[in-house]
Structures are given as structure tokens and as C-alpha cells.
Amino acid sequence: MNLLLITADQWRAECIGAFGHPCLRTPHLDRLVQEGLSFRHHHAQATPCGPSRASLHTGLYALNHRSITNGTPLDARHTHLARELRALGRTPALFGYTDTSLDPRCYHESDPRLRSYEGVFPEWAVVQPLGEDLAGWLAWLEDLGYGRLTLGELYGRPLGEPLKVRPEHSETAFLAGRFLRWLERQDGTWSAHLSFIHPHPPLVAAEPFHRAVHSDDVPAPVRRPTPADAAALHPWLATQLAQPLSSGWWGKPDPRDDREMRQARAVYFGLIMQLDAEIGRILAALDARGELDDTLVILTGDHGEMLGDHWLWGKNGFFRQAFHVPLVIRDPRWREVAGTEVRAFTEHVDLLPTIIERLGGEVPLAADGRSLVPWLRGETPPDWRRATHYEHDCRDVESLTFERALGLAADRCQLAVHQSAEIAYVHGNGLPPLAFDLVADPHQFTNIAADPGRAADVLAAAQAMLTWRMDAAERRLTGAKLTAQGVLGRFA
């Protein structure tokens, strides 16, 4: 069985045409939905990119892997997907990036890999790297005759102007093409991870995708009347909204400008349609090779995107939009579940156990997630989780922005969320708690933690969060015991 794991950066959960999105036309993603299993309440475990991908690749909650910001080193002792695949005799190929901040204890202090958070888990065979400098793509464009372009020339354009290259030469097409060229050389079972950067900003797409969605047709952001109204909800949100907007080619639209936000949303949807076209190329190639029905295809986002909701752009914070992502799994073994939707809560920490079990390996003892293989068989696992959990750490050892603004020590700049179908409880370490009644208040506007009449509901949610954190505590050695007869139990 081949493995194809595809991630797209900053991809909101509802953004597939088959899910009923009002703007998106995604025929190839729709095909995967029709031929696979869709997990409609799937969530990332942390933001931003590095922490989220650390959870996806290790199967650990952020409270255990502790790579909690872009740049926070990931302890080398943690196993991860590439290492587990190699233990199964596979050579896992990477196209793109994993945003892994490497453990500095394992490298000389002069090693250039310690100068960036954009590291890669060492066990991946990197076929085509593609970090934020996009060097491989730029070199390819030069070979195609575009000249020696800079990122500023390509992406430093006014919002609304398209990418000045042909759609088949976009960076999304480039990465897909590199995978397809590699695929042609494969003779036997293979494992690959494609990590696409779009629809992450910059919000510039090649035509016809740049104008595939008209700004007048996009849904309006979900938000209170003014940024000040939104800021009144919580000190973290007030601090985040007070941050200056970034500028330059990697910049973000101004969420306070309605015209600009609608245009930005439209281009974001166009980038997803561009991704869909490249997924179509990949599926066609697998069909042509006769390998689609011998390939486990997993498609997800690393984390979500606020897209102007609550006056925010990006993925930081505690709102659901930043963590809720698509997950579609096409497993040719159990075709009878094709087109089915799973409404139970699933999480990124479940992906490593799912892949390893499906490929015949033993799930690592340390993994916090649970295998999704029973769902793929059409079964409902007993005692499945009734809530999802995610975290955001806002410390910054360089700027100390949130530490100073909130009056918190770095280790207290944390937010954790326990979200059931009814209530989302947000706990801030040294910050006021938040709770939202998701049935009566799905947009998360009203904090019921401040309502004495809801004290029992809030207490129950807080206790459920504590139970989750206790259940997820480190377990590598806790199931073993040294006795006169030797070591009993299981350990890792």
C-alpha cells in the first residue's frame, strides 16, 4: 500500500465545494470526498505552523511535545511519522516543508539549520524543499525564461493583482510537478508527503484562479460591529488586535477595510481552486499508473484561517476557525464507506496512529491520538472522544510582546481549549477564562463564564479540560514497573 499525505497551509474546514461552500468549485477535491471518508469535525492541536505540524507528525498534544511556537525546538527524543515509516522499511519522500525547529542539543551551534524555524524532521528524504524563500521555484521560473525574479516582484503587488506567471508555473503547480516527476521513477511501494503552502498568504494567485471568485459573492466575515467591540471580549484578543498590520510581500489584508477583506477572501478561495487543479493532476497520474486503488490518500490542512472573522487574519488565538480543518481519507480497501461523513471529533494527533496501523506497524506508546482505522472500516469505535482540544502559546522570546502587554511570565502565555458540541471552554494561564455556548452562540460572541447562571456548565467544562490534560500526561514509562521478576508492563 502506497501512502500519499497531502497538507495545505491555513485551510479552513468548510472550504471544499462538496461541503456546500457557496463560492468554491473543487471537482477533484469533491471526487476524493465522494470516494473517501470525510471527517467533518477534525481539528489541529496547536497554532501556528510549527506547533501544529509537530502534533500532526508526532501524534502528541502540544502539552507533551512542547514545540509551542515557530522556533521553539522540538525535542529529538520524540518519534514521528518519518521515523516510524523508516521502521517499517519505507523511505518517506518529502515535497515542501515541515517547519520543524530542530533540537539545538543535536547540532553544533554554528550549524545553519539552527538559524531558522523551517527545519525538517531528519528522517524525511527531502526530494524538493520549498521553504519561505521559495528558492527552488524561483530557479525553475528562471529556467523557464521568466528571468531572475524576486519574491517582491512576484508577490509584492497591490491586493487584487494576479501572479504574473502562467497557472501551470505557479508554486503550487511546481510542487505538484516535482512530485509527479518523482512518481514516474518509482517502481514498487512508495510513501510521500506533499506540503503545499497555499492558501497561506501571500494572497496572489495565477489567472484564472485569481479572479475565479468575485469579491461581491464571498460570505461576509463573522464579527462584532467594531474591533473595539471584539477586543472587549478578552485581554489576549485586545492585545492581538492592537498589533500593527504586517507589510511587504508576505503581508496581510487590513481586516478593518471591508472592500479589502472581501477581495482577500475571494483570492483565498481562488488559491484553493488552484490547489484543486493540482490535486486533479495528481489523481490523474495515479489513475494512469493504476496505483490509485493501491494508495492510501490523506488530505488535510495544517491549521485553519480566521479570514477576517472576529477582525482577525491568520491562525493565532482560541477561535474555532483557526483550528478546524478538512480531513478526507481515501482508503481503497474499504470502498463501502465511500462518501460517508464522520461527525465525531477527530484530531491531528490521530493521523500518525492511523497511518502506522494501516501500514501494518505498531502504534507508538507515546502517541496521544487514536487510530481512525475503525472509522475507515465503517465501525464506530467505543468510548470515542466527545470533545476536541487545542492550544495556542503567545510567548515571544524576541519581542516579549504578549508578556509585556498581558503582564505574564513567558511560561504563562498559554491558551488551551476544550470544545464539545455544546461548549467551548478557553483557559488562559493567568488570564480570565472564557466559555461559549456553541448551540445558542455558534459565532462565539458571548462569554458565559461571566454569567453566574451558567457557573455549573462552565465548571463542568473546566473539569473536562483537567481530565483531558491528566489523560494526556506523558506515558512512556508509566505503564512499566521494575520488580524482582524484572520489568513488567509496556514502555517506550
Image: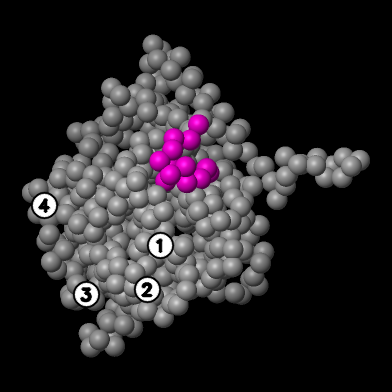
Q: Front-most of 115 and 422?
A: 422
Q: Nearer the viewer, mark 3 or mark 2?
A: 2
Circle 4 residues within 10 Å: few <14, some 14–19, many ≥20:
some
Identity of the amino acid at label 2? Phe
Taking the spot 34% from the left edge, 73% from the top edge, the residue there is 289
Identity of the amino acid at label 1? Thr
Q: Earlier in the sequence, mark 2 or mark 1?
A: 2
In the picture of the structure, the residue carrying the numbered disc 4 is 215
Residue at the top extreme? 453
Is 275 situated left or right of 116 in this image?
left
Which label was assigned to residue 11?
none
Q: Nearer the viewer, mark 1 or mark 4?
A: 1
In the rendered view, tell whether residue 185 sits above or below residue 220.
Answer: below
Task: Report helix, strand or loop for mark 2.
Answer: helix
In the picture of the structure, the residue carrying the numbered disc 1 is 295
In the picture of the structure, the residue carrying the numbered disc 2 is 179
Q: Taking the image as drawn, is residue 82 in sight? A: yes
Q: Nearer the viewer, mark 1 or mark 3?
A: 1
Q: Position of residue 322 (x, y in %)?
A: 35, 45
Identity of the amino acid at label 4? Ser
Q: Are marks 3 and 2 in contact (CB under 8 Å)?
A: no
Circle 3 residues within 10 Å: few <14, some 14–19, many ≥20:
some
Q: Are marks 1 and 3 in contact (CB under 8 Å)?
A: no
Q: Are marks 1 and 4 in contact (CB under 8 Å)?
A: no
CA–CA distance in space, label 3 to label 4 = 24 Å
Q: Earlier in the sequence, mark 2 or mark 4?
A: 2
Range of the magenta residues? 369-382
